[in-house]
Each structure stands twice: as structure tokens, then as C-alpha cells.
Amino acid sequence: MTQPQTPAVLFVCVKNGGKSQMAAGLMRHAAGDTVAVYSAGTKPGGEINALSAQVLTEIGVDITGEKPKPIDPDLLSQVDLVVTLGREAVVEPVPGTPIENWDTDEPSERGIDGIERMRLVRDDIAARVTELASRLNGH
């Protein structure tokens, strides 16, 4: 009997320091080893956003060891789904690889900044990740 293939998802934002890293960390936390998780940036920054890491630590997710990285074209053609986070990250379509955009909550547009903003962003991404984990695992 063959083992079912583990679904793979690539989360992409511009800098790969905040939202895509949060989504990847939350997916690893939610799905464990049932989903292969990757993240990348269209224009990677130099480090993980400190507030992103802090609000994830509050719920038991550690992304402090992660580093921003560019999109690997080989990986892009191998994953089952690409998820872009926000309006700015654009990934050129690859035949056979669906791209889904999450137009994530942006509390700063409502005058909410700092740690409070990041907690709202985290909670929005976490809800989307939970739904995606369930979908990828056929539940």
C-alpha cells in the first residue's frame, strides 16, 4: 500500500519577515507533519519581524530561528498550493500550481499599530491557517 503524499504549501509575502513567516509557523503548529510548510518573500528582508515573533511566542509558536529567503523556482513548481499574504506579494503563475491570495486584515488602516496590530494580524492568519490545514488534510 502506498503512503498518501503529504500536501505542501508555500506562504509568500514581500519581505518574508512577518506575515508569511507567521503563516508558516502557525501551519506547522496546527498541522504538524501532515503538511509540508515553506515560506518565502518576493523581495526578502534581512530579519524576522520582532513583533511577529513575539505574538507567536504568546501562543506557543517559535519562529525566531527562521530567516527571510527568496522564492525557490524549483520549490514553486513542486508545492501543491502557493498562498500570498497581503496585496503587495505577486507570484508569477506556474502551470499546475494554484495560487490563493489572503487579503489579510490590516489594522493599521484603522489606526491600530504596534503589538495590538500584530495580535490582530496573527489571529486573522491563524483562522485562515486552521481552515487551510483542514482543507489540505481532506477534513
Image: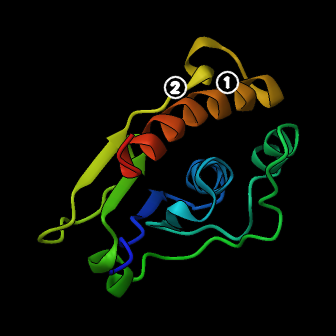
**Where 43 sits versus 29, above or below?**
below
The crowd level at tag 1 (other Cα within 10 Å; few <14, some 14-19, many 20+) is some
The residue at the point 65 percent across, 28 percent down is 123
Find the residue positioned furthest to the bottom: 74
In x, y percent, where is residue 66?
Answer: 73, 70
In x, y percent, where is residue 93?
Answer: 18, 65
In x, y percent, where is residue 2?
Answer: 33, 81
Amino acid found under the numbered disc labelled 1: Leu
Left-right relation of 38 to 99: right
Q: Which residue is mark 1?
A: 120
The residue at the point 45 percent across, 59 percent down is 12
Marks 2,1: beta carbons within 8 A:
yes
Q: Secondary structure at mark 1?
A: helix
In x, y percent, where is residue 5?
Answer: 36, 73
- Front-most of 42 and 35? 35
Amino acid found under the numbered disc labelled 2: Asp
- Front-most of 70 and 77? 77
Q: Which residue is mark 2?
A: 105
Q: Secondary structure at mark 2?
A: loop
Where is the C terminus found, in terms of image quarters?
top left
> Is residue 76 in view from this perspective?
yes
- Front-most of 26 and 47? 26
**Where 79 sits versus 114, above or below?**
below
> Is residue 89 in view from this perspective?
no
**Where 113 sits versus 77, above or below?**
above
